[in-house]
Image (tube, coloured by chain):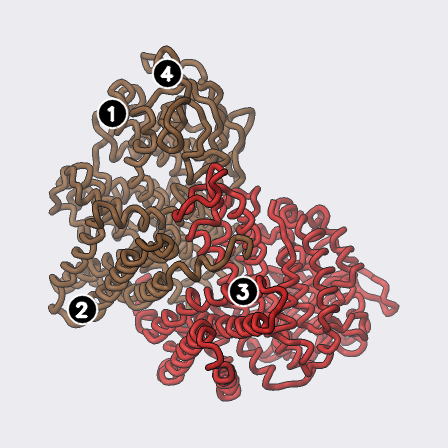
Chain colours: A red, B brown
Amino acid sequence: MPTYTAPTKDLAFVLNSIIDVQNSDIPGYDELDPDIINAVLEEAGKVSSEILAPLNTIGDTQGCRLENGVVRTPDGFDTAFKAMKEGGWTALDCDPDYGGQGMPYVLGTAVGEMFVSANMAFNMYQGLTHGAYSAIHAHGTEEQKAKYLPKMVSCEWTGTMNLTEPHCGTDLGLMRTKAVPQEDGTYKISGQKIFISAGEHDLADNIIHLVLAKIPGGPEGIKGVSLFIVPKFMVNDDGSLGERNGVSVGKIEEKMGIHGNATCVMNYDDATGYLLGTEHKGMRAMFTMMNEARLGVGLQGYAQAEAAYQNAVAYAKDRLQGRAVTGAENPEGPADPLIVHPDIRRSLMDQKSFVEGARAFTLWGASLIDRAHKCNDAQADGLISLMTPVIKGFLTDKGFDMTILAQQVYGGHGYIEEWGMSQFARDARIAMIYEGANGVQALDLVGRKLALDSGKHVMGFFDMIKTFIAENKGQDAAFDADFLDPLKAASKDLQAASMYFMQNGMKNPNHALAGSYDFMHLFGHVCLGYMWARMGKAAQEALHSGTDDAAFYETKRATGRYYMKRQLPATALHLARIESGADPVMALTADQF
Amino acid sequence: MPTYTAPTKDLAFVLNSIIDVQNSDIPGYDELDPDIINAVLEEAGKVSSEILAPLNTIGDTQGCRLENGVVRTPDGFDTAFKAMKEGGWTALDCDPDYGGQGMPYVLGTAVGEMFVSANMAFNMYQGLTHGAYSAIHAHGTEEQKAKYLPKMVSCEWTGTMNLTEPHCGTDLGLMRTKAVPQEDGTYKISGQKIFISAGEHDLADNIIHLVLAKIPGGPEGIKGVSLFIVPKFMVNDDGSLGERNGVSVGKIEEKMGIHGNATCVMNYDDATGYLLGTEHKGMRAMFTMMNEARLGVGLQGYAQAEAAYQNAVAYAKDRLQGRAVTGAENPEGPADPLIVHPDIRRSLMDQKSFVEGARAFTLWGASLIDRAHKCNDAQADGLISLMTPVIKGFLTDKGFDMTILAQQVYGGHGYIEEWGMSQFARDARIAMIYEGANGVQALDLVGRKLALDSGKHVMGFFDMIKTFIAENKGQDAAFDADFLDPLKAASKDLQAASMYFMQNGMKNPNHALAGSYDFMHLFGHVCLGYMWARMGKAAQEALHSGTDDAAFYETKRATGRYYMKRQLPATALHLARIESGADPVMALTADQF
């Protein structure tokens, strides 16, 4: 069975040395001194490896069962969920006014990585609740907030997001679920929603569904969609639970992975709903939480890669097979461990350099969300809005690829469920799909975000890279060659791609959209290259200042060099594809396929 | 549920126009006139889509069950297996001396593609038998051949290959299974073998296991391995079945995919075995069938991609979601079909251009195997030996990637097992692992095949490409620009990579091995680019000569252009990685991971 060791040291390195939380002006960051960070990470790491990880295989094997309208979660999930609640982990970055601990989102994200690595399916019960919490927090009335939030912060009640219907997922304008206004100000919600994660389960006393629906007579399409709070059990004024509402689970889907999380078909039959926010502005309300939600999915991508990587390393050190081509390294044994072989190294370095880069990128993104929210910083908000599709799309694509690499290290055993490597890949696979399939992320990036505020944010991104290079160049020839020169080249490719879109996308938008997926990956590489340059610099500085943990920083630097040498050059390929334009892509008519 | 339509037209195009079977001097190819080809492909296509494909989901869902030492295959497998036998499909390219039909291997390969696309797990029962048939055919005594082959050609008896043991897969020198010589010339085989596909099942009267084992006192390691025939039921001299032999199934593995095929732990307890070939030369005997076996696995990679692609196209045409950015294409409907979106096109074109290129590459490889065997052509044998790891490694890696792309087209539905797209990915995944994991293929390519016969075969490959370009250049500027120039550039990258290995691999073999995986992919792209150039030329010629099927050839040409523009440029990235050498890859010590 796979194991998981929380990478607390690396998380602390990113928070302390890259995000530099102690020197940040973001309100609340001043509380994050190294001791607090270590204490929180260590404790969360313990929960992850000792409570959540051992349930991961069980969740996959048992899955969820629908019995007489009740969904049973896998053995042990209830005890673990109780431990999460009692440990205060569900409240970590929530508003103290509603029982939260008010810690920065960046710390919640670091902790979340460990929970997700240890047990992605389990953590979704809490993750979805957090999303619903954020929506009510941002758009609810004082009364709604007082009624729902405290119980959601503590996860006594969990939450869901209901968007998709059988005939529409991406194109929510086609939605059919209806919300008929009642005289008492409530709405009667009727319709069917699908793919509802944690839609029904036995871990909480109540479930607060957030449901998108159309009020009859409202505007056509996406502009007529409103958001509603639909509790599973009605909530009395004193906070006690009343009657069962008209919402029920139709079935649980059989999925490729995340079996421990119940993906439900939800049927709404004249269920009582309460408008959340403004009529017909439901999509806007959803959008305000989108950066967070999508960052959380991007995190799932690399968090699964991290867990898979750890096990691949252990197997590569343990499994004896073949001899090093440069001479036996375990001459006493019958064979050398797999890790002596260059191609196994290549695979492990791909994984390691991706995961560590992705971790820095994601936590940096989380700090931008903190800055946007806590400082009302429009520039930070614009930058994270631009990068959100990159975090979501690139990190989940690559994260999945890395789970496949990790599985491959096991050879035949990787294909056997008992060894657990298949689960990492199967679980990671969903992250490329939900919360906006990655093709939709690419469309969002190229079709919306690039041009946002007249392209101000992408220009800001380029400036930031340029400034970083200018500020650090010329101090150390090796650092320049290893980190800054490749970053500069990659950033140039990204600029050339943006330029191509500007010059050709106006004539024919297909010229931009045909290259959107490659652009998302190109952008992702530049972001990870930038993160590695910053980490390389931090490592360099630590080594120069005579750290007593030289091994850690040397490893960091070597891992960064690998990324710059072996991964970053992919930007040129993406650029070449982008510059080939729409013609090869759109050459066929539909019936020629 | 997914469907499958046999691509008979495209298979015939490759056989007729690319392999040019009618003008070949390979014995037996003269029988393959277009009518015969069409008749065989059509009939096999019918079997595939009507009998095998409908059982694919059933096989995945039910899997195989071990009940009191007997393995039960999924519902319908027995009837379908009977149909395969009765249709003579198991005998297609087998030796007429033993009841085969003596058709060329290239035709068997074309037929095999359809069977594998329709139902990979099912087809393995026959596929493994064919492998065992080939081994006995090549190395058996006349008596052994007479005894086993007729029943294996008809698949009344099936076959298996027993190599892997719990502690060794790639490194078979560590093998522990023993074969103790008996006075009557037989051997007593004892040991445990794992991952034995079709090791036990209810589809045949007998199972002929080919087992690698060590004769005590023989040479150490891989040089002391011999190959044995171990029938499940002893075979009497009159061909009737005798007692049960000392071989039994220990368990069936729970796997990520190919659930319809029983992957068994096989226990040998003083089982009676018959030496096949020469003592201690078991590995050499296995190697003689390796090109075929590995080509068959490469085929599985693209065959799963083909099946997944077909369903992705159907879904993309059917599912209405969003509007074309250039204006509604289905204005009467609530939305446009997915296929209008450029990023969906990109995905479908990636899939289509890969599958068709891979098909040509594989059938070309099969024709080289025919030439090597039927003409005793050492050059053909050297070339296919060189390309075998590329066919196996590149086509299974890319084939798997394409099933993931196809699954992605379905959005959330792709993740739900009911829709069947997950199965294509889960089934395709094994092809990257078995028959030598792809990292081992890369090692075989760079560590052995490149230098084979002093590099003669790789030089021959370069010459072939060069000659093709020289012979076709200057006749049509568009063809030159679309096909020949990119092929030339890609081939130059491959030559540069080979040169890098030659110049640096001698100093330190890690410089070659650290780039082996990229080299395998670089080589694969050049091969597919070469195939596309040949197909582009064939399409060009057909269009110039006024074909009455212009749509087919125009589609072919546009698909080829796509490959050359959007896929082939990957060679530069692979070269850049290769030329970065071993240092970044090997920079860390094992404990730094």
Q: Residue B379: x and y, percent?
A: 17, 45
Q: Residues within 10 Å of mark 3 (few under 14, many from 20)?
A: some
| Circle 2 SS class | helix
Determine whether, in the image, residue A425 is placed left or right of residue A35: left
Q: Which mark is residue B186?
A: 4
Check disc 2 and give the amino acid type: Asp
Nearer-N-terminus badge (1/2) = 1
Question: Label 2, on which residue?
Answer: B480
Question: Label 3, on which residue?
Answer: A554
Q: Residues within 10 Å of mark 1 (few under 14, many from 20)?
A: many
- The reply to the same-chain question for discs 1 and 2 is yes
Q: Residue A333: x and y, percent?
A: 49, 38
Nearer-N-terminus badge (4/2) = 4
Check disc 4 and give the amino acid type: Thr
Mark 3 to mark 4: distance in Å?
60 Å
Frontmost of labels 1 and 4 is: 4
Nearer-N-terminus badge (1/4) = 1
